[in-house]
Amino acid sequence: MARPSQQLDQVLLQSGRTLFAAHGCDGLSLRLLCEHAGVNVGMFHYHFRTKDIFLTQLLQTMYDDMFMQLQAEAAHAGTPTQRLRQSLCLLGRLLREHGAWIGRVWSDANRGEAVARQFMEKNGVRHVQLIIMLVIEAMQAGEIAPAAPMHVLSFLMGSVAAPMLIAPRALEMGFVPASFQEALTNDVLSDQGIADRVNRALFALKASKQEINHV
């Protein structure tokens, strides 16, 4: 006979995914979480014991879902630049989908929330390392101009990651004039907008050393 608590841990984690971006580490109370999940607090303690353990697992599972998709994209067949292009496009789409909770983790870590800081310390460089390795492979293959990998990464993230983190928050907070909202959604946040910026960034990185030095 199945135990009555079966799968309730996943129900709680799913509610955590829904609520975390709006409430963060501090604001996501056990009462709010359990009411949303339809689970009593006793079952929460049975599965997770403490709120910090729950938050640690919640953040890790959300990040691991994203990272495994990036790993799979980076491992596809193709030239280094093709794999870099597809990985960057996927990263942009993932940030569009998950940017709210990622931004909340950054905010919580900046305010000294221990769970958020530990999460950032553990995971903050994993996706960065993956993209840098693709950049280095593309340089070694002669597909993009030689440069400091971190310099190239910062250029790519300015083209891909920054708009996906900033633009949705600006829309949510009402900072974008009504006349710009449709264009921002269609031209910046869409799959096509992401792909266009990635293609433009990679085209710029093809420039030879002589062209860069001349500029």
Image (cartoon, helix red, strand yellow):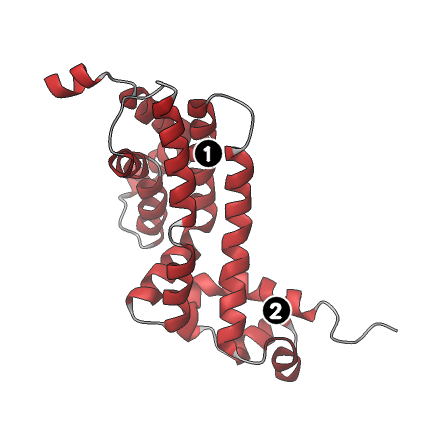
* Residue found at the very far left of the displayed protein: 214
Q: Quadrant of residue 146?
A: top left
Residue 61: percent from left, percent from top:
55, 58
Considering the image in quadrants, where does the C terminus appear?
top left
| Of the image marks 2 and 1, the number of the one nearer the N terminus | 2
Q: Quadrant of residue 156?
A: top left
User: Which amino acid type is shown beneath numbered disc 2?
Assistant: Leu
Disc 1, SS: helix
- Relative to residue 208, is residue 191 drawn left or right? right
Residue 206's label in the rendered image is: none
- Residue 87 bears which disc, if any? 1
Residue at x 29% of width, y 70% of height: 111
Q: Residue at x 42, y 45 (%)?
A: 127
Mark 2, Cα crowd under 10 Å, few <14 / some 14-19 / many 20+, is many
Q: Quadrant of the N terminus?
A: bottom right
Relative to 78, 209 lies left or right: left
Of residues 197 and 155, the one nearer the viewer is 155
Is any part of residue 215 visible from this angle?
no
Left or right of 158: which side holds 92? right
Residue on which the image places disc 2:
12
Q: Residues within 10 Å of mark 1 (few under 14, many from 20)?
A: many
Q: Is residue 34 above or below residue 174?
A: below
